[in-house]
Amino acid sequence: MLTSNNMSSIFVLDQDKALRFYTEVLGLEVVDDIDFGPMRWLTVRVPGTDHSVILERPGPPAHDEATAEQIRDLVTKGAGGGWLAFTTADAQAAYERMVAAGVEITQELTQQPYGTDFAIRDPFGNAIRIGQLSA
């Protein structure tokens, strides 16, 4: 039986820009930043957790250039299929921090049946939800 999901992946168009956004704006920490020749293995995670997110640039060795270009086009449109969800102890403070940082807000802070959350996009179009879950 499976016991956990320790890694996920989203496509980003510029790994340096992604690294700044995910660490400086969202507050994640770098797990790996390794040059593997044809690709850069760049992963981040919420501090104190063991689930990493690969910030993957479309291209070799996983994709030929034509496929990579199609993926980049879809990501730019917000249709790349990638999305992330994070929890926080204070959704209001997290929301205010995102607004102050100039992050694109796609859904205002909203009371939901499961708690309070809001939605943003990263600089490439990936959807992110940040929520404070009800006890």
Image: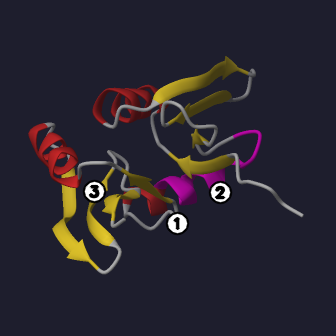
The percent coordinates of residue 79 (x first, y second) are 44, 68
Which is more foreground, mark 1 or mark 2? 1
For the point 49% across and 30% down, the residue is 47
Q: Which residue is mark 3?
A: 120
On the picture, is 105 further left or further right than 47?
left
Q: Main secondary structure of the magenta part?
A: helix
For the point 30% across and 48% down, the residue is 89
Q: Which residue is mark 1?
A: 81
Q: Which residue is mark 2?
A: 67
Name the N-terminal-most of marks 1 and 2: 2
How far, Cα to Cα, is label 3 from label 2? 26 Å
* Vertical placement of residue 129 versus 34, above or below: below
Q: Check contact, mark 3 vs mark 1: CB within 8 A.
A: no
How far, Cα to Cα, is label 3 from label 1? 15 Å
Name the N-terminal-most of marks 3 and 2: 2
| Three-letter code for the amino acid on which mark 1 is drawn | Gly
| Three-letter code for the amino acid on which mark 3 is drawn | Ile
Q: Quadrant of residue 51?
A: top right
